[in-house]
Image (tube, rainbow, N blue to C red):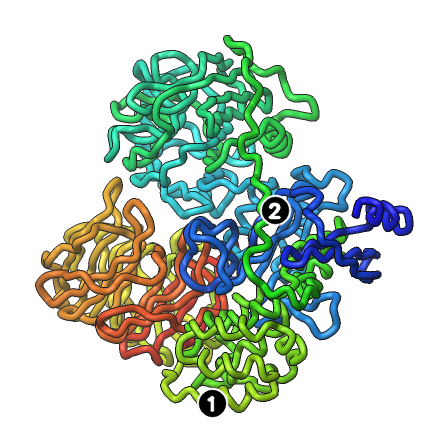
Amino acid sequence: MVEVAQQVEQLYGSTTCQWFDSIPNHSFIFKKEYVNKTYFFFDIKVFIVKIQMSTSNPFAYNTGAVINGTIQVGSLSVGTPISGFTSSPQFWNGPNEDLGYVIAKPISGNTQPSPVSGVTASVAFWGTKNMTNPLSDSSFIQLAEYVANKNATPQTFSSATDASIWLTNNGYWNSYITPVLYLDAGNTASYPGTGTVWTDLVGGKVFDLINGPGYDSGNGGKFYFYAAGNQYANCPTSLSSLPIFTTSVWHNWDGINQGGEPCILTEVYPGNTGAINYVLGAPQGIVARGGYFNGGFQLSPQFNLTPNTWYNIVVTCDASQVVNIYLNGTLISSTPTTGAQPSSSEGGINLMRRWDNPEFWGGYLSTVGIYDKALTQSQVLSIYNTTKSRYGYGPNPTPSPTNTETPTVTPTNTETPTPTNTETPTNTPTNTETPTPTNTETPTNTATQTPTNTATQTQTPTTTTTLTATQTQTPTNTATQTQTPTTTTTLTATQTQTPTNTASVTPTNTASVTPTNTVTPTNTASVTPTNTASVTPTNTVTPTNTASVTPTNTTTQTQTPTQTPTQTPTPTNITIAHVWSAGGALITARYALAGAGEQNAALAIGGATSVGLTCTEKYNGTSWSAGVGLTNARFFLAGVGTQNAALAFGGTNGRCTEKYNGTSWSAGGALINGRQNLAGAGTQNAALAFGGYSAPTQLSCTEKFNGTSWSAAGTLITARQGLAGAGTQNAGLAFGGYNPATLSCTEEYNGTSWASGGALITARQNLAGSGTQNVGLAFGGYAPPSQLSSTEEYNGTSWSTGGNLITARRYLGGTGAAGLNTALAFGGKAGYPNSRCTERYS
């Protein structure tokens, strides 16, 4: 095999030859790449073991619940399932990440072109492999901007971290180290320049700026915390436990602290567990040290900071529990620690304050990042080099502060990605070793991208060679979509979900799979019947899991797609599926807004751009028009009622309630408990307010409005914020939210008390809701680390899958009290830009 490879390299050049390994039958395909085209020269079957392993990830197109052991980014499931690989969804191995950074995007409906005629895919890859410095931050930024521009959302990124966060928030997966929490005082999406809230760009966690820290636009944006003024920031919720972690801050100490053991960054103690996952500051009265607390402090040696000097301070803890400290990209100490691994206190996070007592750290804080992995020395240096110019450092960093300790151990690159050649993920019939299908992952397109014909990445997925087989599986997903079949034509909208899973598989076969997409029987026929046929019929059977739809598919599969069209209609027990369709765009893009009314007579209320808004807009079923604004600007508020008799309450303005008569807003009775990020149900004169947040507490309290004033009512079982509501004052529904983790719980209100209902399929926060207690709708939202497009329908007992939103987003507004067919979704965040898009459910 090596000799064959060497001959090919001699003929075509080692730098332009790529290998695709389709695990089932070890068939290798060599391909020659030019600027915008890929040509396959020959296919050689070699029955030998693989020559080498590479760092890569398995990918599956998954629109269902998060698979244990994987992460969900948009519609992509990435990683190795704890329960093993399945054929539904089918997993395929991704590109080699050792050769460069990789960006992946799901492509709905199996429409992604591939180098193979007649074969399309459901995943696209781009990469930096062919760029001059493929693993540099600058190359990743260049690629991310190319991808954003290619997908009609042009961006300019100031750092690789910003690029990675934007990609993640917009449904792309990327191999760059993405933080699990990131605050940036210079990013208006994190801090708009005014206000008392500093927002995490990744998970949306809110840090309250307490006692008035001052904002300064210098150095790209920073906060000054005056220790003697007891100024600090607090988030009431923690991240999940991070046994392996990295914390990174850009900080300028003023040399003045208040108390003996203040901190720059720490979890709140004791919380629920008596642990502290990460701590940086003076935990034992020494400036400064980093580490964690597991019953005893596990800390680095002391290191010194020179006052009025900017430092990028990075603390890492790897799987061996070695704590490393970096100052301005330089490793200054490496300390083995003992005892239990780091774990969360579950009590929240403090910035510039000690973990419990009122002791405060003084100076500037500009960015805070927390990662769920131990960054390597090269990664730490790369981040420093990308961001240092903001703090006055040129090409050669200023001398780092003196370290009292010599760096003993070498930094552990623990993250050594395990080579997931899992691509074999399973089955996939050996037949169509035509791995080519997976080339479908558009990377080929990427070839055009200047930096790299990274398209090459796509190769990896090709491992899926037998994709076709998997196609058949997709029906399983379609099952969920089966709902859609009856909608037939409209199904195409939902198609995005079903095919998508198969997509990962990508063979056009999906067509065969989707009899459920009965909508377009023609597609199924058009799909290369030959592929489906070639696919082992047995695989086709597997799809039978797919609920009602599959039965017919299974037979069809083996018999050539031509039959599938006729079969699709057969399932008589299919329920009519609902889908989202585009409506007229809002006049003002915004997020954290409220809604009232119905699909053809709706109201969009308040919200925020970079600041709170008063604006009100009215929808007539086609377009939005300006209405008279709220008296009090605010966001994270709730709204109920109709277009001409609405109620707005709570939000960043606290207790304020306002009533709308179709023309103007007037004051109503104030809430008993001021709060934001709450939910509501009912009408203008019979409303219900429940849940929410009032620093530093998530709330369970419920209040009832009688048209004039609010009174206390039964409390929620689970206190939470970022939840959604539906129903009436005496038959309410509360679902989703977070405290401190993202929640799936549902509660039903009977006018007196709350009782547990069926749990959401996908736990989510910052979602929208509509409908009644027995016909409810939950749509959009956020399930770290992904913004959601998925919709769920409630029947009074349990939730089932509905049609996906066209645009995945969180912090959106929703309304439609009369049932599923009256729902309207508008605004929200689909990434950094706020959204104007409106969608209607029918």
- Residue at screen point 65% across, 43% down: 54
- The residue sitting at the top extreme is 404
In terms of image quadrants, where is residue 656? bottom left
Q: Position of residue 319 (x, y in %)?
A: 46, 30
The amino acid marked with disc number 2 is: Ser
Q: Which residue is mark 1?
A: 569
Q: Position of residue 334 (x, y in %)?
A: 51, 17
Q: Nearer the viewer, residue 590 or 109?
A: 109
Q: Which residue is mark 2?
A: 56
Q: Nearer the viewer, residue 464 or 212?
A: 464
313 left or right of 737 in image = right
> What is the spatial separation of the Cα atoms under label 2 and label 1, in whole angstroms?
41 Å
Q: Is residue 146 visible in the rendered structure shown here? A: no
Task: Estimate how packed mark 1 is, as few (under 14), some (14 to 19) or many (20 or more) residues with alpha carbons within 10 Å.
Answer: some
Pointer 2 with pointer 1, Cβ within 8 A:
no
497 left or right of 356 in image = right
Q: Position of residue 356 (x, y in %)?
A: 26, 26
- Residue at screen point 34% across, 14% down: 284
- Relative to residue 72, is residue 523 depicted above or below? below
* Label 2 or label 1, whichever comes before in sequence order: 2
The amino acid marked with disc number 1 is: Pro
In terms of image quadrants, where is residue 158? top right
Q: Position of residue 83 (x, y in %)?
A: 43, 52
| SS class, disc 1 | loop
- Relative to residue 800, is residue 146 depicted above or below? above
In terms of image quadrants, where is residue 427? bottom right
Q: Is residue 301 visible in the rendered structure shown here? A: yes
